[in-house]
Image: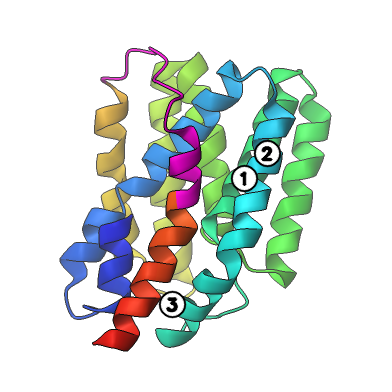
């Protein structure tokens, strides 16, 4: 992720940095889905993501402005929170509510852009499927990414770089379901807005 953002801000002429960055989102999406199955308070988890999403929005919008992107787009933490909400509904077997929520979040993306938009939500849902049915999950992850590439191509947009996200499936196959340490949990929450602030400061110092 950091490599992707460094390339985004400082080295747009080096697509290899963004290609490396494509590996990060499938891993984040999987960890969100896995965390949703193991946390004791999934709605508390969602609230934390939203809180740090709000904290991160100003530096994220500013960097988006610096690189000429839409500064109104919401950062990835909002996407992760939305995906986790869908996972929460699936956990409770509220399938109809999950479908309605997905439709609602998809329609919202028409009016309020958020990082990875509907594709991001589908990757989180595919990751949840991967946890429950590994082969079907792999197929869903691959189909979602290839489908996104095909759709963008039909709209005249080059999304070739997103195909490299398929490589992110490989490390998931080696995941042993063991729960990691919670010791550095708040550091990882804080790292996202902190690294955006640091990148913006470095940009102005150069």
Q: Name the quadrant containing residue 203.
A: bottom left
- Mark drawn on residue 156: 3
Q: CA distance from mark 2 to mark 1?
A: 5 Å
Report the front residue among 187 and 167.
187
186 horizontally vs 8: left or right: right
The numbered mark, 1 or 3, whose residue comes first in the sequence reads 1
Q: Please report contact status of discs 2 and 1: CB closer than 8 Å, yes or no.
A: yes
Residue 86 appears in the picture as rendered: no
Gap in angstroms between the C-alphas marked 1 and 3:
33 Å
Q: Is residue 73 above or below residue 166?
A: below
| Image location of residue 168, percent across then percent down | 29, 40
Give me the disc on residue 78: none
Q: Main secondary structure of the magenta part?
A: loop
Image spot of residue 104 (x, y percent): 79, 51
**Looking at the rendered structure, which numbered label has been put on residue 46?**
2
Mark 3 residue element: loop
Report the magenta residues as a range. Answer: 174-190
Residue 102 to residue 129: above or below: below
Residue at screen point 76% across, 18% down: 92
Q: Is residue 44 left or right of residue 171?
A: right
Closer to the camera, 38 or 18?
A: 38
**Picture residue at 25% right of the left edge, 30% below the top:** 171
Using the image, tell me which numbered label, if any, was put on residue 49.
1
Q: Residue at x 62, y 41 (%)?
A: 83
Q: Nearer the viewer, mark 1 or mark 3?
A: 1
Q: CA distance from mark 2 to mark 3?
A: 35 Å
| Local secondary structure at mark 1 | helix
> What is the image's colouring?
rainbow
């Amino acid at each position: 992720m950091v490599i992707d953002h460094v390339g985004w801000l400082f080295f747009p002429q080096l697509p290899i940095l963004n290609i490396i960055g494509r590996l990060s989102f499938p891993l984040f999406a999987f960890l969100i889905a896995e965390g949703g199955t193991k946390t004791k308070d999934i709605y508390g988890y969602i609230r934390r993501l939203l809180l740090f999403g709000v904290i991160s929005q100003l530096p994220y919008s500013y960097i988006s402005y610096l690189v000429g992107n839409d500064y109104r787009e919401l950062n990835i933490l909002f996407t992760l929170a939305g995906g986790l909400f869908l996972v929460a509904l699936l956990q409770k077997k509220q399938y109809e509510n999950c479908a309605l929520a997905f439709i609602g979040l998809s329609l919202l993306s028409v009016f309020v852009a958020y990082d990875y938009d509907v594709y991001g939500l589908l990757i989180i849902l595919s990751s949840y499927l991967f946890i429950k049915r590994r082969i079907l999950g792999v197929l869903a992850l691959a189909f979602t990414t290839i489908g996104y590439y095909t759709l963008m191509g039909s709209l005249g947009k080059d999304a070739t770089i997103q195909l490299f996200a398929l490589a992110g499936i490989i490390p998931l196959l080696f995941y042993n379901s063991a729960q990691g340490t919670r010791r550095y949990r708040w550091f990882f929450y804080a790292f996202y807005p902190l690294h955006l602030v640091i990148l913006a400061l470095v940009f102005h110092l150069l």
